Amino acid sequence: ETGVTQTPRHLVMGMTNKKSLKCEQHLGHNAMYWYKQSAKKPLELMFVYNFKEQTENNSVPSRFSPECPNSSHLFLHLHTLQPEDSALYLCASSQEKIPGSGYTFGSGTRLTVV
Amino acid sequence: GENVEQHPSTLSVQEGDSAVIKCTYSDSASNYFPWYKQELGKRPQLIIDIRSNVGEKKDQRIAVTLNKTAKHFSLHITETQPEDSAVYFCAASVSYGGSQGNLIFGKGTKLSVKP
């Protein structure tokens, strides 16, 4: 692991279920991100948190609800998802105040909605 | 907002040949351009990056070039090896006031290096 840990690695859920994805970073970064990666699509930015404050919601449906209790933890709460929400969900972190510091990604959660 | 286009979507080369992946961006204010490599089933990892005050940067077999006027940047891999096989993503962002903007990614290029 490189310092950004995501759990679970795989998740299968029904459309009426409620589940949560967890991300934890041990790098001392102050910005965290959720990205969605679908087949044949670019990495789509979903949410951005800087210093625990949400600074961007990229027109994400309300069935995705992020939570950032502190600068080391980030959650993505899921409810009443659709099959098209099946994708790899990647968490990333960066040192927001250092331009060009790059992102460190977690291994992702492979989500399947049935 | 920023839009990043990446070509080709797939690239197949023989081991030892060179590979070139090209990206264009739309926001002339973008000034940071990283490249990520994602092996099958693994996380994207930063392999090289370049800022707009530099035209070219090299790291062993990998180089990145930037043409600010044309708003495009390219990844060059020389002497390719089978372990270079992966999906490569370019990205762009604006850094301002000491802060890094959000990365906007291209669609990715699947590189296959045949032994």
Image: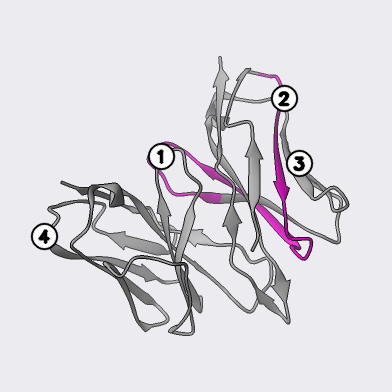
Q: Residues within 10 Å of mark 1 (few under 14, many from 20)?
A: few
**Residue B19: x, y in percent?**
69, 27
Residue B87, position in %: x, y? Answer: 52, 37
CA distance separating discs 3 and 1: 27 Å
Residue B27 visible from this viewpoint: yes
Q: Is residue A64 above or below residue A28?
A: above
Front: mark 3 or 4: 4
Q: Which residue is mark 2?
A: B18
Judge depth for marks 1 and 2 and give the one in front: 1
Q: Is residue A36 left or right of residue B87?
A: left
SS for callout 1: loop
Q: Amino acid at mark 1?
A: Ala
At label 3, which amino acid type do we have? Ala
Q: Nearer the viewer, mark 4 or mark 2?
A: 4
Q: Which residue is mark 4?
A: A16
**Same chain for the residues under marks 4 and 1 in the image:** yes
Instruction: Look at mark 1 in the image and give the residue it sits on.
Output: A39
> How far apart in space, not on screen, are marks 1 and 2 (Cα)?
26 Å
Q: Are marks 3 and 2 on the same chain?
A: yes
Distance from disc 3 to disc 4, alpha carbons, whole Å, reads 48 Å
The reply to whether label 3 and label 4 mark residues of one chain is no
Task: Write down the region rendered in magenta.
Answer: B16-45
Determine the residue positioned at 63% across, 79% down.
A97
* Left-right relation of B59 to A38: right
Q: In whole angstroms, how far apart are the C-alphas of marks 4 and 1?
A: 24 Å
Q: Residues within 10 Å of mark 3 (few under 14, many from 20)?
A: some
Tag 1 near tag 2, CB within 8 Å: no
> Residue B90, relative to residue B17: is it above or below?
below
Q: Residue under circle 3?
A: B63
